[in-house]
Image: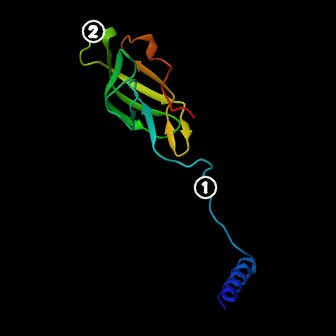
């Protein structure tokens, strides 16, 4: 009896899906890659989301960063850049803009792969178009 009921249910569902017009799907298709959180990996290996303070290199860091954009193909923030290269004149840092690029996705998580820092002050050359760590695939 149970087997007959399951068979009838399967037939009813099959007939309903094929009836006049079948299944109708509307709207855009979901993205081929699932979206999820996006991170930047700081110099010491910490994966951070929208960090206000983080190390860029062994000798440079960004502080007080306010992000104008995050999670897209690029992230842009403004804050203070500082490092041992500018001491003793920049204890609080220099006003700067950081741009993160090279968004790389692994499963449902994204990581920025490059950064560039620009400032009206002279900053260290290794803050332009530099690689960031991303987890191995």
Q: Which residue is mark 1?
A: 30
- Give 84 or 96, whichever is nearer the viewer: 84
Crowd band around label 1 with a 10 angstrom C-alpha radius: few (<14), some (14–19), many (20+): few
Query: Where 43 falls versus 68 (above or below)?
Result: above
Which scheme is used to colour this image of the protein?
Answer: rainbow
Q: Name the image quarter holding the N terminus.
A: bottom right
Location of residue 43 in the rendering, given as x and y in whole percent from the top left corner? 40, 23
- Give 108 or 120, whichever is nearer the viewer: 108
Q: CA distance from mark 1 to mark 2?
A: 51 Å
Which residue: 69% across, 73% down?
23
- In screen coordinates, is 94 left or right of 131? left
- In screen coordinates, is 137 left or right of 62? right
Crowd band around label 2 with a 10 angstrom C-alpha radius: few (<14), some (14–19), many (20+): few
Q: Name the image quarter holding the C terminus.
A: top right
- In screen coordinates, is 75 left or right of 29? left
Tag 2 or tag 1, which sits nearer the N-term? 1
Q: How many marks?
A: 2
Location of residue 95 in the rendering, given as x and y in whole percent from the top left corner? 32, 21
Q: Which mark is residue 87?
A: 2
Q: Which mark is residue 124?
A: none
Q: Residue furthest bottom?
A: 1
- Give 15 or 28, whichever is nearer the viewer: 15
Location of residue 36 in the rendering, given as x and y in whole percent from the top left corner? 49, 47
- Local SS, label 2: loop
């Amino acid at each position: 009896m149970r087997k007959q009921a399951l068979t009838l249910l399967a037939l009813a569902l099959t007939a309903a899906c094929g009836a006049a017009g079948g299944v109708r799907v509307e709207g855009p298709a979901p993205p081929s890659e699932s979206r999820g959180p996006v991170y930047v990996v700081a110099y010491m290996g910490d994966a951070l989301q929208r960090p206000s303070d983080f190390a860029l290199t062994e000798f440079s860091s960004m502080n007080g960063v306010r992000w104008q954009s995050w999670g897209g193909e690029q992230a842009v923030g403004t804050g203070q850049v500082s490092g041992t290269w500018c001491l003793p004149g920049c204890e609080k840092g220099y006003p700067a803009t950081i741009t993160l690029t090279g968004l790389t996705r692994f499963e449902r998580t994204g990581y920025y792969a490059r950064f560039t820092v620009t400032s009206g002050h002279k900053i260290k050359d290794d803050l332009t178009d530099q690689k960031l760590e991303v987890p191995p695939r």
